[in-house]
Image (cartoon, rainbow, N blue to C red):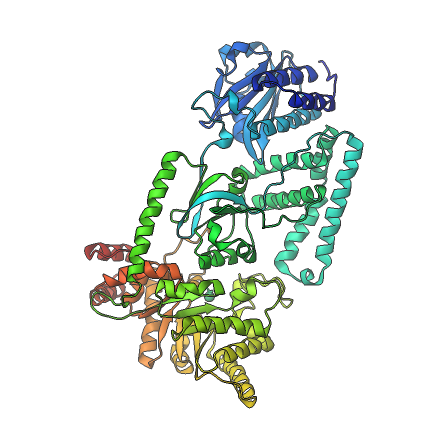
Amino acid sequence: MREITAGPRVLLRRLREMMAEALEPQERLDRIVREIAQNMVAEVCSLYILRADSVLELYATEGLNPTSVHLAQLRLGQGLVGSIAASARPLSLSDAQKHPAFAYLPETGEEIYHSFLGVPVLRAGRTLGVLVVQNQTRRQYREDEVEALETVAMVIAEMIATGDLARLNRAGIELDLRSSATLKGLCFNDGIGLGHVVLHEPRIVVTNLFNEDSDQELERLNEALSSLRLSIDDMLSRRDVAFEGEHRAVLEAYRMFANDRGWVRRLEEAVSNGLTAEAAVEKVQSDMRARMLHMTDPYLRERMSDFDDLANRLLRQLMGRGPDALSEIVPKDAIIVARSMGAAELLDYPRERLRGLVLEEATPTSHIVIVARALGVPTVGQVKGAVSMAENGDAVIADGEDGQVHLRPQADIEAAYKEKVRFRARRQRHYRELRDKPAMTKDGIAVDLLMNAGLAVDLPQLAQSGAAGIGLFRTELQFMVVSTFPRVEAQERLYRDVLDAADDKPVTFRTIDIGGDKVLPYFKGAQHEENPALGWRAIRLTLDRPALLRTQIRALLKAAGGRELRLMLPMITTVEEIHQARAIIDREVRHLSRFAYHLPTSLKLGAMVEVPALLWQLDELMQAVDFVSVGSNDLFQFVTATDRGNTRISDRFDPLSVHFLRLLRQIVHAGSEAGTPVTLCGELAGRPITAMALLGIGYRAISMAPAAIGPVKAMLCDLPLELLSERMDEALANGGTKTDIRAELKRFASEHDIPV
Ligand code: PEP
Ligand code: MG
């Protein structure tokens, strides 16, 4: 067995020289493979490039039949080369022809070569091609040789990415890097966005690939690693983090990874092979990302993405950059692509330039999604691999209607979407025409269509949507999008703006509903909870921290001076909690009147029905409050024991089921008997079909996202409600719990030509 004569450093130096020379791309490639073969003492070195049609084409070879270049082809997954590309893992064999995946390509004349080493050419986790060396003898390639070939592959990846090879393509054939891709996700906010990718955390482009002196570079790497570890320790010891569940857990994981021997060793190896520290981080990160893309276990994926974040931090450290400024030039039609992001970060982008949002993570109730919905930005979530597949500036379509993302779409897809957007615009025009019409069913029954809001950015929607008022103002959103508790003045200002914008339309303010999935990172009192949804949240928290509630009530009372104030309490479990809250409110009223403040003309207090325990206190509840609003999101979560944020089970049970509708009907009946108005303000109110069911069981006021008002109103105007109510009564009485209510409703809608 022959040994390597020159190390990878020499090879990298030669490659650098070749990159700098003015050569035709094919010649450059030919020389590169020759150089690699020589350096690694291999008889063969070949480079296969992945085309957009999933075919790996031989682009250059030293040792195989030269006439097979650009002719020899393998499909992705076919043969050894195809398997390496598909799995994104290297493969080293001393007798390749014995391997079950071996596919013989007669035109190459490769039958005489036994040993085989192939590595994927990766960039940002994507496979762009495969680099192979072969020898006649049956030999084992050593670890350091695999490592060296991977390092070279990384340099080639950069060549492909910079478009150097594009000139070698035949007409009509494209490389996979620029190919279009359709990624599946979930609809988080309706709407279609056409535009260009803005990576929320732009990938740092490493331009300086080769080091001059490995020892010095190792020192640089180790220094950066030390400061990274120090900065994590520092964050962990900060008071506000020390007691935090989520934050702390993530940072603990980072600390563990920053000390991970395997990771550090791979980084060091790459530097010893001649890469700069930053190129080494990128190389190891790329391998990691590729593995992440092929991983199905959500826990492991999550851990891998922690590594990914950490690598980004390390890159920034090495390149002397803090977190990227958001003010980087954002195109006029930006589609933000992120793994996840904070709600406040989205607000930093100029709204008029936002066309869409694509998230690898998040759930429909995550803060970022709530804010995206408030801004009316089409949003697709849970899009695996979006960040590694997309490059800044790529054309992209975010389809929030079907939960799909089309990256670098082909012309026909783009044309189809442009048509779809035009169609939606026509529909929007129709909704706008409905705006000033009364919200009345076909048979003349009036319904209150209210909107949900929570931020100042929502307010213009009140006029634009034609809502009859704000049925749910989620006051916690103001707390969630900032980094410290908003002061009483800031709260008062927002509430006053809301009331001014509403003019004389009613606004129902809900007292802060934090805890559960709505975490305030700066709130010191919270502790890690096993079951946060069932934990210290909403009214439970504010009754225990009355100062918080008092401040908010004071701000609300002042803002509503001279007008009506409607206040609503979230997550009520017992009627007693309402009495306790009322005592705090009364005290504030007394306090303000003592100082001769201008008080609201009337104060209406309501409670949300979200906890099933209230269902057995309905009579007392209706007596204790002025109005009730059903929070169907939480109520459904608790009634069916189904975590509302868990996408794995989110489709398992249908709220349009006999049992849940019977229960919702019971609440609205209890309200009419007691003369207490009942509304519903969960997501159920916002889809025409579910809204139709709610009307059919007796609801006459529902509150929804502003964008839903148009479609729901269009449904309403064509709805013969008396007929539907009879149909629903029958279905809920006789149907048994197996009746498919959704199908019944669809049938009814099509019989009566109702747009649902
Ligand atoms: C609900 O639970 O249905 C609701 C409206 O409140 P939130 O979604 O804010 O928890
Ligand atoms: Mg709720």
Inspect this view and state whether residue 108 appears. Answer: yes
Q: Is residue 592 above or below residue 124?
A: below
661 left or right of 621? left
The residue positioned 66% from the left and 49% from the top of the image is 253
- Residue 234: quadrant of the picture: bottom right
In what quadrant of the picture does the N terminus appear? Answer: top right
Q: Residue furthest bottom?
A: 594
The residue positioned 26% from the left and 58% from the top of the image is 745
The residue positioned 30% from the left and 51% from the top of the image is 426
Inspect this view and state whether residue 101 appears. Answer: no
Locate residue 727, reporting x and y percent: 22, 63
The residue positioned 55% from the left and 50% from the top of the image is 340
Locate residue 750, reporting x and y percent: 22, 54
Locate residue 258, reporting x and y percent: 70, 45
233 left or right of 399? right
Question: Which residue is at the front of the view, 551 or 43?
Answer: 551
Question: Which residue is at the front of the view, 378 or 294?
Answer: 378
Q: Is residue 274 above or below residue 622?
A: above
Tell how many labels: 0
Q: Is residue 126 above or below residue 624?
A: above
713 left or right of 531? left
Locate residue 43, reporting x and y percent: 64, 12
Ligand 1 lies in which image quarter? bottom left
- Residue 204: quadrant of the picture: top right
- Residue 536: quadrant of the picture: bottom right
In what quadrant of the picture does the C terminus appear? Answer: bottom left
Question: Which residue is at the front of the view, 113 or 367?
Answer: 367
Question: Which residue is at the front of the view, 635 or 177?
Answer: 177
268 left or right of 343? right
